[in-house]
Amino acid sequence: MDVLLHVCCAPCSVACIEQLREEGIEPVALWYNPNIHPFTEYRARREAVRAYMPAVGVSLIEAGDYGLREFLSALPDWENRCETCYTLRLGYAAQYAAAHGFEAFTSTLFISPYQDHGAMQRIAQAAGEQYGVQFLYRDFRPRFKAGQQAAREAGLYMQKYCGCVFSEEERCRQRHFAALRKKREAEADSKR
Ligand code: SF4
């Protein structure tokens, strides 16, 4: 079966490729991620994918480029941005797969325990129906930890946030408040 595998990043692809190959499927990777910001982060993740795919013998298709304006202009509401983000990426993967003769498509996003799995499944299914290509549903999540460990051991670039500037802000806020909490606890301890 000719399967197009949308790849969100190299570390998440490790176990997905492994599982598909165990099933006898040889996927072709698609890089299309206008959600990743800023440019330095986009480039770091893309470079990791560019290095990893040939290393494991997977063909790579690159679509689009750094997509700050494309991503932000697609967002009707940044508080509820993830469904739009899934629609952009999974919709593009479905469209590309249909236009280029693939039998099915799927995504490495389905390995992440941090994403809204149900929403992604619904959106990918609808995109497959819209473009007339099979959505190959796989729940890769049981392999997440092992895949991340293998990626670390392989020296792949490991990102620290989901991708968009809002997720980067959330990570910074969490770090900031964690540091503040620590400081206050230390001050309180020193007064005891
Ligand atoms: S948090 Fe992640 S899934 Fe949600 S919009 Fe940002 S990059 Fe996309």
Image: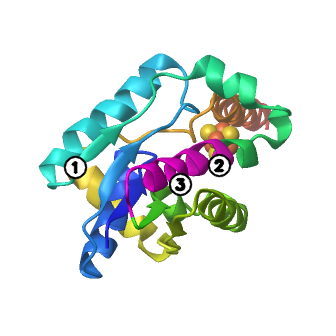
Residue drawn 64% across and 35% down?
Answer: 171
- Ligand 1 position by quadrant: top right
Q: Magenta residues? A: 86-102
Q: Main secondary structure of the magenta part?
A: helix
Instruction: Find out if the beta carbon at label 2 lies less than 8 Å from the nearest ligand 1 atom.
Output: yes
In what element is the residue under mark 1? loop
**In terms of sequence position, does the residue under pointer 2 or pointer 1 come before the other?**
1
Q: Amino acid at mark 2?
A: Tyr
Left or right of 54, for residue 81: right
**In terms of sequence position, does the residue under pointer 3 or pointer 2 come before the other?**
2
Quadrant that contains the N terminus:
bottom left
Q: Is residue 19 magenta?
A: no
The residue wearing badge 3 is: 94
The residue wearing badge 2 is: 86
How far apart marks 3 and 2 lie (CA) works out to 12 Å
The residue wearing badge 1 is: 59
Q: Is residue 98 magenta?
A: yes
